[in-house]
Image (cartoon, helix red, strand yellow):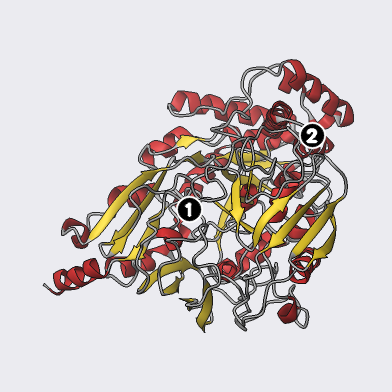
């Protein structure tokens, strides 16, 4: 079932998948020798890296994973689910069109083949002092918006201020950025609230740069269907509200020949058609009306790729391993609901989830259950806490005794194992015991609180594709006496209800990164938990969590970072804020055989729009074959 969707554009903005949030990680900004926590003079650096040195030196010509001679041209047809009513990707209102952020450039941009490394784009270089109390950027003189006007320090400063005002998520993410300053015709400096945040320089490097002369007379917090002015490789060409959006490649794109872009953004036209649900879209793909398909459903992958075009070799089916950190895909439990504020109730919900049976019966045994918020990294908590980690947890417990359950020190967290009917019955019995301890009793077949209120759960979904999995889980919850319902709504209503916290349980994806930082505040901070539109959709308000998050943000070295992250992992897991689902370490895709791609795909993202191209000879041959 749905694995986390890969961000198509792989651009370094806060909202490239909520998720790209975790990709905006900073650290020592280096060109040659680097170690996390080492100081360095404020040198001008072409790339910013954390934990590892950037692979490419300042004289690089292009990334190794691109085809620098990739042909330009042609139209590629893609799809999106639902609808849209907005071309402004920076507001929390409305539903933004797919890829609406791709018309904007950022100061620096991520490499699709390296973790926590960004290279200069609008900014040719970046610099920061040893104490990380500020960062400065040197802007490329040739950087331009689509109307030909240069990108200036004033634009960069305006972007930071306007985004923080327009969107709570930017305000929270950049809250330690206190002031921007123009220090030269092409130089801008951002001052921080204090020293020691090693990630913040790179996070600022992910700032999308907006044209001040365009947006200062418009409200960035409002929706719009007027195509905004951008600076990236594509501009909006045509809009059919809610039905399709078409982007055209900018022929005189100012950055097309930069090493960071060589061999990329090859399609002349990107057309994205909207479908209300997946089935209709897949039929359009099978008919040749969509060119590329990223598959995120195990059942579909196992059963739906034997159609005639695949058998004839006209459609290629591909599974590629990736090295992205594992996100936490889960049923997120809304802590703002009174019935979920007791940890025993939340633990009972986890015990009732029979992943093993679901994986075998519905998921073709394709997945593994996700046991940690930092899975596939050295920050995953294992065993019992020892040494500095234990001391940190004890310190957190003194701050918030109720926020760090005593079991954190006594047992290693393990997801419950269902599978066999006998084991699952044991899990349900344990769940029933916890619910009784939480004050619920059975009245007939329904659980009621001491006040006589029934225990109810509504699952809010934005796609029918997850319905059968939720039905399976709901059936087991009903065995406990919990009244359940499933509601599938359109994307606009779904976003509005999540934005205003009007849900019980939703399917949520919390991405992680090999170097956690400020984005942890977005996920868990108490400060903004009840403000509409924030990323802490679960509504976690735990001062122990706040304490550990700040330890991550201001970690002095890799050991401190790892220790704080492991401690946070334990506290989150033992508080049972989510019912963890599953993950899959491959990208699955299918495409009509008229597309070209690099021989070596980048390890972090298949980057379809970024590095693929239309092969004219293949396209002609495909047309002949399809006519037969």
- The quadrant where residue 267 appears: bottom left
Residue pictured at 49% horizontal, 53% vertical: 5
Can you say whether 69 is above or below 566 in the image? below
Q: Are marks 2 and 1 in contact (CB under 8 Å)?
A: no
Residue pictured at 28% horizontal, 53% vertical: 317
Which residue occupies the foreground of this view, 504 or 501? 501
Can you say whether 163 is above or below 362 in the image? below
Q: Which residue is mark 2?
A: 551
Where residue 602 sits in the image (x, y, percent)? 44, 48
Which residue occupies the foreground of this view, 85 or 556? 556
Q: Crowding at label 2, few (<14), some or many (≥20) Cα neighbours within 10 Å?
A: many
Q: Residue furthest left?
A: 628
Where residue 78 sits in the image (x, y, percent)? 41, 68
Q: Earlier in the sequence, mark 2 or mark 1?
A: 1
Q: Is residue 432 visible?
A: yes
- Give the number of marks: 2
- The quadrant where residue 97 appears: bottom right
Q: Is residue 538 visible?
A: no
Tell me the SS state at disc 2: helix
Q: Which residue is mark 1?
A: 466
Q: CA distance from mark 2 to mark 1?
A: 36 Å
Locate the C terminus and report the quarter of the image it occupies.
bottom left
Q: Residue furthest front?
A: 59
């Amino acid at each position: 079932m749905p694995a986390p969707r890969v961000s198509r554009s792989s651009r370094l903005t806060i909202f490239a998948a909520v998720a790209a949030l975790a990709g905006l990680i900073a650290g020592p900004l280096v060109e040659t020798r680097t170690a996390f926590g080492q100081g360095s003079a404020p040198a001008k650096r072409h790339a910013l890296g954390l934990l590892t040195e950037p692979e490419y030196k300042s004289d690089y010509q292009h990334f190794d994973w691109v085809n620098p001679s990739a042909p330009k041209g042609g139209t590629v047809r893609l799809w999106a689910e639902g609808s849209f009513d907005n071309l402004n990707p920076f507001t929390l209102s409305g539903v933004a069109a797919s890829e609406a952020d791709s018309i904007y450039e950022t100061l620096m941009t991520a490499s699709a083949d390296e973790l926590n490394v960004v290279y200069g784009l609008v900014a040719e270089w970046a610099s920061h002092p040893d104490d990380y109390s500020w960062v400065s950027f040197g802007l490329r003189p040739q950087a331009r918006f689509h109307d030909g006007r240069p990108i200036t320090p004033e634009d960069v400063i305006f972007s930071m201020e306007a985004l923080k005002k327009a969107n709570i998520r930017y305000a929270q993410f950049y809250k330690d950025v206190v002031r921007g300053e123009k220090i030269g015709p092409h130089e801008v400096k951002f001052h921080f609230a204090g020293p020691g945040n090693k990630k913040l320089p790179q996070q600022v490097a992910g700032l999308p740069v907006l044209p001040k002369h365009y947006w200062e007379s418009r409200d960035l917090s409002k929706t719009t269907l007027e195509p905004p002015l951008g600076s990236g490789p594509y501009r909006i060409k045509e809009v059919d509200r809610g039905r399709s959006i078409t982007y055209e490649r900018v022929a005189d794109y100012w950055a097309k020949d930069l090493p960071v872009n060589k061999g990329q953004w090859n399609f002349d036209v990107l057309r994205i058609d909207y479908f209300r649900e997946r089935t209709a879209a897949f039929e359009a793909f099978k008919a040749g009306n969509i060119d590329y398909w990223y598959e995120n459903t195990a059942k579909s992958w196992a059963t739906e790729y034997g159609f005639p075009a695949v058998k004839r070799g006209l459609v290629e089916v591909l599974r590629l391993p990736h090295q992205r950190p594992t996100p936490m895909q889960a049923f997120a439990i809304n802590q703002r609901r009174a019935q979920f504020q007791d940890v025993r109730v939340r633990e009972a919900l986890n015990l009732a989830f029979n992943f093993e049976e679901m994986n075998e019966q519905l998921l073709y045994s394709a997945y593994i259950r996700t046991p940690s918020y930092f899975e596939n990294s050295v920050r995953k908590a294992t065993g019992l806490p020892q040494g500095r980690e234990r001391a940190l947890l004890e310190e957190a417990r003194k701050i918030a005794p109720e926020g760090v359950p005593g079991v954190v020190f006594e047992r290693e967290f393990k997801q419950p194992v269902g599978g066999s009917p006998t084991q699952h019955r044991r899990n349900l019995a344990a769940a029933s015991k916890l619910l009784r301890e939480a004050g619920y009793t059975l009245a007939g077949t329904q659980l009621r609180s001491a006040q006589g209120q029934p225990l109810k759960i509504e699952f809010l979904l934005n796609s029918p594709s997850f319905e059968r999995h939720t039905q399976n889980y709901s059936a087991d919850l009903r065995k406990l006496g919990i009244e359940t319902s499933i509601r599938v709504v359109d994307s606009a209503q779904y976003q509005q209800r999540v934005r205003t916290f009007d849900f019980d349980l939703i399917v949520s994806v919390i991405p992680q990164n090999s170097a956690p930082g400020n984005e942890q505040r977005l996920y868990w901070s108490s400060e903004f938990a009840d403000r509409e539109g924030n990323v802490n959709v679960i509504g976690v308000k735990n001062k122990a969590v706040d304490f550990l998050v700040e330890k991550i943000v201001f970690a002095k070295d890799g050991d401190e970072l790892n220790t704080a992250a492991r401690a946070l992992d334990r506290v989150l897991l033992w508080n049972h804020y989510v019912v963890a689902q599953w993950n899959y370490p491959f990208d699955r895709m299918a495409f009509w055989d008229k597309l070209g791609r690099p021989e070596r795909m980048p390890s972090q993202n298949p980057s379809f729009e970024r590095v693929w191209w239309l092969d004219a000879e293949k396209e002609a041959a495909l047309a002949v074959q399809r006519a037969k």
